[in-house]
């Protein structure tokens, strides 16, 4: 994706601060030397004068620790920089680089802990480094974000020693920053590559004009056998005294609205990923494909109210804004107001467009409000209604019950699946395109969009 470099968070750099008032400790070799002094205890059972040797040894070790501590530089002689090598995206591994500068006059060994939040990594990254005097050393670690939205990596903590390893100091480097975790950018890139290899992108990017398809007026010519009667231009025919037909071409710039439900039903997880995260990934894939085709794409995300609205536009800058909006769409604990979203879309979009509605339906005996809301749009717009299903529900419906409890369980699952099929069929009867997908939302959505474009249904 061309915007990947721009989406990568900026690097931050900071100078070390003393962690606390007494930010010192004993190094591992200090305890090794103390353990060596235990050998004095054996002879002390026979001659108590050997205890003086033990005390003298311990005093020597403590003095060596104090000398090593005195040689350790202050915390402000250390600098750390955090550099993001890739934009953080949902479920996509990326790398972060930590660079430690040593402005002191002696080499140091350091243990660096980057306090990254759980959205980026399960446990904080802990890295061991050896830095020469007046030089720097860097290392990288991997993150794999598990949630979209905003994350706040914290400070970096450094424990550093001299090469003797007797004493240790602690430092804190303030590197707190705000980063945005985007939808799955790799998934959108794969779908856009698929489009490049398809006939659709060949039609759109080369501006190949195919007459007889689409409803965008191209020119007039004399009527020929096989032309549709509805394409006859009667006014031109009256002027010329012979039948004249209109020629059309595929529309090069249509309007696509992506509507995302962020209500409570979208909090459900499907194979470890929430339905809203899957919807955001699919929306990004569709947006990139549609923008490459020359269409104008808008975004509407809603819960109890309209939370995100991006007017339809085109271009790479618009795709970047789309990614930024999709990154921060968050689910709500209450049921979404679907009728409000439909009303807002009807008031904003007067001309016919393709409305891609990504949602889920409540398992109730009544007709869900989202189905009613989508039905109100079919009068003016072409609606592609995508329901995010539950794979475990279909598995339960297809299982052969082994006992009475299993029979009731399978019957309940079959009833829910049948009710959802009936609701989707009802939408299709009103002119909408209704599909259900669970894990492979992006391919299903992109394929449905391509089929609409190729058949000039919009």
Image (cartoon, helix red, strand yellow):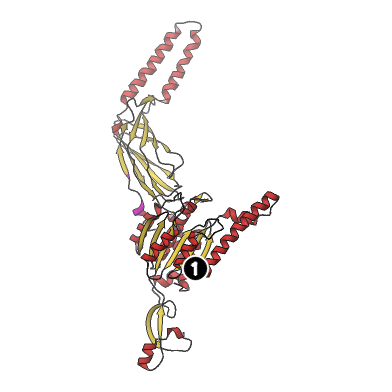
Question: In screen coordinates, is 311 left or right of 268?
Answer: left
Number of numbered callouts drawn = 1
**Residue 179 in view (yes/no):** yes
Q: Please give the residue where the numbered disc 1 appears in the rendered image.
A: 432
Q: Which residues are magenta?
A: 5-11
| 239 is higher (above) or lower (below) than 141 | below
**Residue 188 in view (yes/no):** no
**Image coords of residue 176 (percent x, y):** 34, 40
Residue at point 43% right, 25% down? 28
Residue in the foreground of this view, choosing between 244 and 153: 244
Q: Assess disc 1: are there few (<14), some (14-19) or many (≥20) residues with their C-alpha within 10 Å of its C-alpha.
A: many
Q: Secondary structure at mark 1?
A: loop
Q: Quadrant of the C terminus?
A: bottom left
> Farthest residue toward the front?
366
> Farthest residue toward the right?
403
**Image coords of residue 270 (percent x, y):** 53, 52
Residue in the foreground of this view, choosing between 70 and 39: 70
**Image coords of residue 399 (percent x, y):** 66, 54
**Image coords of residue 175 (percent x, y):** 33, 40
Residue at point 41% right, 14% down? 57
| 457 is higher (above) or lower (below) than 298 | below
Quadrant in which residue 344 is drawn: bottom left
Q: Quadrant of the N terminus?
A: bottom left
| 302 is higher (above) or lower (below) than 76 | below
């Amino acid at each position: 994706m061309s915007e990947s470099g721009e989406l990568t968070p900026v690097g931050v750099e900071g100078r070390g601060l003393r962690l606390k008032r007494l930010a010192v400790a004993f190094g591992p070799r200090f305890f090794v030397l103390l353990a060596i002094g235990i050998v004095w205890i054996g002879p002390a059972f026979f001659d108590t004068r050997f205890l003086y040797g033990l005390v003298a040894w311990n005093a020597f070790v403590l003095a060596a620790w104090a000398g090593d501590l005195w040689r350790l530089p202050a915390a402000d002689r250390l600098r750390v920089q955090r550099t993001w090598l890739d934009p953080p995206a949902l479920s996509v591994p990326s790398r972060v680089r930590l660079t430690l500068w040593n402005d002191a006059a002696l080499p140091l060994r350091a243990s660096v802990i980057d306090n990254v939040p759980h959205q980026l990594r399960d446990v904080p990254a802990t890295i061991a480094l050896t830095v020469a005097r007046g030089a720097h050393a860097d290392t990288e670690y991997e993150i794999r974000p598990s949630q979209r939205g905003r994350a706040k990596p914290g400070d970096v903590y450094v424990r550093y020693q001299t090469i003797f390893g007797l004493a240790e100091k602690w430092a804190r480097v303030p590197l707190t920053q705000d980063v945005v975790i985007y939808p799955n950018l790799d998934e959108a890139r794969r779908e856009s590559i698929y489009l490049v290899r398809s006939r659709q992108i060949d039609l759109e990017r080369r501006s190949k004009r195919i007459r007889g398809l689409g409803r965008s007026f191209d020119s007039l010519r004399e009527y020929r056998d096989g032309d549709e009667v509805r394409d006859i231009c009667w006014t031109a025919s009256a002027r010329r005294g012979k039948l004249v037909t209109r020629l059309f071409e595929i529309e090069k710039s249509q309007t696509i609205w992506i509507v995302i439900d962020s209500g409570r039903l979208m909090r459900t997880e499907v194979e470890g990923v929430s339905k809203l995260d899957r919807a955001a990934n699919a929306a990004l894939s569709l947006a990139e494909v549609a923008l490459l085709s020359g269409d104008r794409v808008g975004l509407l995300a809603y819960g109890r109210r309209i939370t995100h609205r991006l007017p339809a536009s085109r271009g790479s800058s618009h795709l970047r804004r789309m990614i930024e909006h999709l990154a921060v769409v968050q689910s709500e604990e209450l049921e979404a107001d679907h009728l409000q979203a439909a009303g807002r879309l009807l008031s904003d979009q007067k001309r016919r467009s393709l409305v891609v509605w990504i949602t889920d339906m409540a398992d109730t005996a009544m007709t869900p409000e989202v189905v009613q809301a989508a039905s109100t749009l079919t009068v003016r717009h072409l609606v592609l209604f995508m329901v995010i299903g539950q794979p475990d529900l279909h598995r339960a419906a297809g299982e052969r019950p082994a006992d009475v409890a299993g029979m009731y369980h399978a019957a309940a699952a079959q009833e829910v699946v049948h009710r959802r099929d009936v609701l989707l069929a009802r939408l299709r009867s009103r002119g909408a395109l209704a599909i259900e997908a669970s894990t492979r939302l992006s391919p299903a959505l992109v394929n449905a969009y391509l089929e609409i474009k190729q058949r000039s249904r919009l």
